[in-house]
Amino acid sequence: MIILGISALYHDSACAVMIDGKIVSAAQEERFTRTRFDPAMPVRAVRACLSDAGVHITDVEHVAYYERPERKLGRQLWSGLPQVPETSPVALGKLDASRPFRQIEQLLGFVGPVTAVAHHEAHAASAFYQSGFDSAALFTADAVGEWTTTSYGRGDKNGIELFEEVRFPHSLGILYSAVTSYLGFAVNSDEYKVMGLAPYGSPGYVDLLRRLVTDQDGGQFRLDLDHFDLSGSGPMYTDRLCTLLGRPARSPESEIEQFHTDVAASLQLLLEELLLLKLDHLHQVTGSTRLGYAGGVALNCVANRRIREQGPFEEIFVQPAAGDSGGAIGAAAMVHHRLTGEFSPRRLTDARLGPTGRTAPARTWMRRAGVPALDFAGDEAGLLAHAARLLADGAVVGWYQGRMEFGPRALGARSILADPRDPGMRDKINALVKKREAFRPFAPAVVAECCAEFFDLAEPSPFMLDTTTVRRGSELPAITHVDGSARVQTVDRSDAPRFHGLLTAFGDLTGFPILLNTSFNMRGEPIVCSPADALTCFVRSNLDALVLGDQVIARADLPRHWPGLLDDLLPYQRPPISRDVYTFL
C-alpha cells in the first residue's frame, strides 16, 4: 500500500511517501522553493519524493493529512476573525476548511481518498511508529494544533490513544515563543537561539517567569493571559510582561546584554521544570518505561537531555522532524495502521529520507565555466583522504552527498564541515559563512564507536536532539559551548558510510574522529537541496572548498565576479510568516 502523508498550509510544509508501512522518501517544500518555512501545499516536494520512490501520483492509494481542518477553523474563527480585513481575500481564503482537500486534488492531482488525522495524533504517531517500540507512553507539545497544545497518550499494536490534552491558549510553545519575541528573536523560527543563549546567563528571573504559568493537577497548566497577546495584531506579549521583568523588550538585532541572557536562562529552566512535571504525570498514568515524544517543543535538545537524565522514562525516542513537517510522517503511519491493521515496529536511525541530488551534471557545468575540479569518481578513499587533509589544514568545506536530510538538522548530507580543534573556527564560520550571531554554538559529528571517549553520552544520538558534556572540551573549542556541552551527532557506519569514512580519515590525521557540522545554508535561507543550490551557496559564502559528490572545487578557482552576480540574481526572500507573532491563520 502506498500512502502519501501531507503537512501543509501553516508553516514548514512537507510530504512523506510510505510504502507498506515504511517511509521511503520525505522532504520539506522550503528546500525546493528556497522560501524558508514555506507553508504552501508541497507540490515540488511531492513531485520529488514520488520520483525518488519510483512511483507516480496515480500509484498513491491514500493521502493522509496532518490535521483536522474543520477543528482548526473553529479555533481560527475564535482567535483570528476580528483581525481579518474585509478586503483581504488571501486572509479569508485561509478560513476555509475545504482548502487542503481542494488543493490536494487540484495541485497534486490526487482524486482518491483523503483522511485527515488530528494534529497531535500526527505528532504522536510520528514518534511512536518510528521509535521501534511495541508500546510506549506518548507526549506531544507545541504552540497549537487545532485546539490542542499538549497531549498525553499511549501507543501499542492496536494504535494510538490520546487520553488527555491541554487546550489553547494555554501552551508551552506559546510561553517559550512569547518570551523569544520579547528577547528580540523571531517566533516559530528562533526559539533555538534562546536555547543557545541560555547557558550564558543565570536563571535569576525564573521566579518572575513562574508567574506566567500555573501548574495544575494531572497534565494541566494555565498561562496568565494578561501577559500574552494572541490576537495576531502585535507581539505575542503585552506590556505587563515588560513590567514584570522591569525592562522593555529588546529590539531585533540590537546588543544582547546580561539581562537578556539571564531571561533566556530563566525561561529554559522553567520549560524544563514544566516538562518534567508533566512527564511524571504521564508515567504515573501509563506505567510505561518508554516514551515517544514529538511536537516543536521536542526540538529543545537541552530540555531533552534533562528529560533523559532526570525524567521517569528509561527509553526515549524523539522524532527527528519533531515539528510540523514531521506530521506528514505521522499522518501516513497512522492511516496505514488503521487501514491495514499491520504493525511492525521499526526504529528510524537515518533521517536522510529526501531525494538524492544528481551531482554528475556539475562536471559539465564546471568544465563549461572553465572552473577546474578534482574528480574522484571511483576513488572514494582518495576523495576522503583529500577532504580530510583540507579540513585538517583549516579549510571550511561544503559537503553535499547522497539523500537530503528530513527535518531541521544537517546530518552529513547537506553540511558545512570544519576542524573542531581550531579555537577560532566558530567565530570564523559565524562571521564569514553563516553570518549569524556569535553566541550560537556549533555541533559535532563523531563516529559512533568513539563517542564515549569524547562525550558523556550513553546511547546513540543520530539526530542531534540531545546535548551532553564534552569530556575533552579544551581540545575541542569550536564545538564546546560555554557551559561545556555539545549537541552531538553520532554517525554509524551502516547508516552513513561515506560520512563515517570522512570522520575516520580526519581521525587518522588528527586523533579526533570528529568534525564541526552545521547546516549547508546562509543565514535566513533553507538548507541547500540541489547541486545548483550547493554551488550557489558555495559561491556566495566564504567556504574554502566544496565536495559535491565525487568532485572537489576550490574557492580560489572560482571567477571573481561570480559572487556579485549571484547576489543580484538571488535577492533575499522574507519568510512567509511573521517574525513577531503567531497569526494563528
Image (spheres, helix red, strand yellow):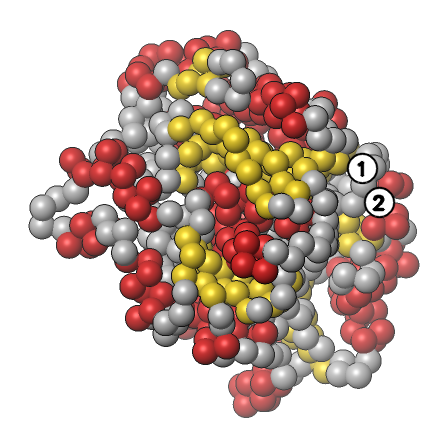
Q: Which residue is mark 2?
A: 451
Q: Is residue 53 above or below residue 27?
A: below
Please state which of residues 12 and 171 is positioned toward the viewer in this rendering.
171
Please report the residue visible at 48 percent of the width from the left and 23 percent of the height from the top: 260
The answer to whether residue 431 is visible is yes
Pointer 2 with pointer 1, Cβ within 8 A: yes
Q: In terms of image quadrants, where is residue 90?
A: bottom left
Q: Which residue is mark 1?
A: 457
Kind of residue sitting beneath label 2: Cys
Please state which of residues 53 and 449 is positioned toward the viewer in this rendering.
53
Please state which of residues 427 and 173 is positioned toward the viewer in this rendering.
173
What secondary structure is marked by label 2? Answer: helix
Image quarter hosting the N terminus: bottom right
Where residue 443 appears, as percent x and y from the top left, is: 68, 45
Tell me the number on the disc at residue 171. Answer: none
Q: Is residue 524 above or below residue 111?
A: above
The answer to whether residue 564 is visible is no
Q: Would residue 506 be found to the left or right of residue 26 on screen?
A: right
Q: Categorize mark 2 by other alpha carbons within 10 Å: few (<14), some (14-19), many (20+).
A: many
Where residue 44 appears, as percent x and y from the top left, is: 43, 70
Where residue 565 appears, as percent x and y from the top left, is: 41, 72
Kind of residue sitting beneath label 1: Leu
Please report the residue visible at 55 percent of the width from the left and 38 percent of the height from the top: 161
- Name the N-terminal-most of marks 2 and 1: 2
Query: What distance separates the C-alpha of mark 2 from that of mark 1?
Result: 7 Å
Q: Would residue 263 be found to the left or right of residue 493 on screen?
A: left
